[in-house]
Image (spheres, helix red, strand yellow):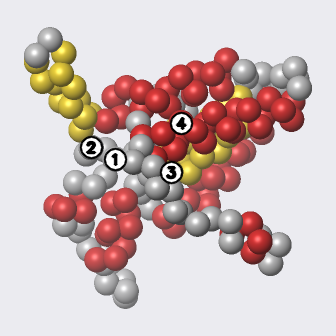
Amino acid sequence: EQAAPLLTEFTFEEESVESHNQSFADMMKLSSSMFDERSGSGPTRPFGQVMLIISDGRFNKAKVRPWVQTAIARQQLPLLVIVDSTAEAAAAVGPSGGGSAAPSKSSKSRSVFDVKQVSYEGGKCTVTPYLQDFPFPYYVVVQDLQALPSILSDVLKQWFELMANA
């Protein structure tokens, strides 16, 4: 009930051609700035502030990388939870009773593990896995949406343990 006014603010009417390239970087910049405002001169403990980000993991890595590095330099810990689309596709295809259906080739190719990136250096084309030079040093890929609450609690538990031992 209390979140209803906040939810009405989400319009998803971004008209910028570059929104897919810039939105994740803008979110990282805004989050880091908000943490700076709350902590003043910085957190009292190393990585005493955590950014828990849930995403499909697809964004412009070159634009996000400097903001991840800035957050880490400011002792802010960006943790990315990637919800992999394979789980959604398999769940949509699978029977509602028991058992599970094997994902089709098209749903398998949507997995973040299967995404490739192409770069051209010196006129030579290079294809590398998308996650090979991923900007987040701390991330987890969730393929089973049923496991998301358990994974989130494990991530937060580990962070609390880190803070207790700092």
Q: Is residue 63 above or below residue 152?
A: above
- Label 2 secondary element: loop
* Amino acid at the residue labelled 2: Val
Relative horizontal placement of residue 72, taking residue 100 as reference (left or right): right
Q: Circle 1: is it few (<14), some (14-19), or many (20+) Cα within 10 Å?
A: many
Residue 55: image tag: 3
Q: Which residue is mark 2?
A: 115
Q: Which residue is mark 1?
A: 112
Q: Position of residue 159 (x, y in %)?
A: 72, 37
Q: Is residue 70 above or below residue 9?
A: above
Q: Circle 4: is it few (<14), some (14-19), or many (20+) Cα within 10 Å?
A: many
Rounded to the nearest whole Å, what is the CA distance between mark 4 and mark 3?
13 Å
Identify the residue at image location x=67%, y=38%: 30
Quadrant location of residue 164? top right
- Which is nearer the eye, 111 or 33? 33
Q: Circle 3: is it few (<14), some (14-19), or many (20+) Cα within 10 Å?
A: some
Callout 1 touching callout 2 (CB < 8 Å) = yes
- Label 3 secondary element: strand
* Amino acid at the residue labelled 3: Ser
Rounded to the nearest whole Å, what is the CA distance between mark 4 and mark 1?
19 Å
* Amino acid at the residue labelled 1: Val
Residue 25: image tag: 4
The quarter in which the C terminus is drawn is top right
The quarter in which the N terminus is drawn is bottom right
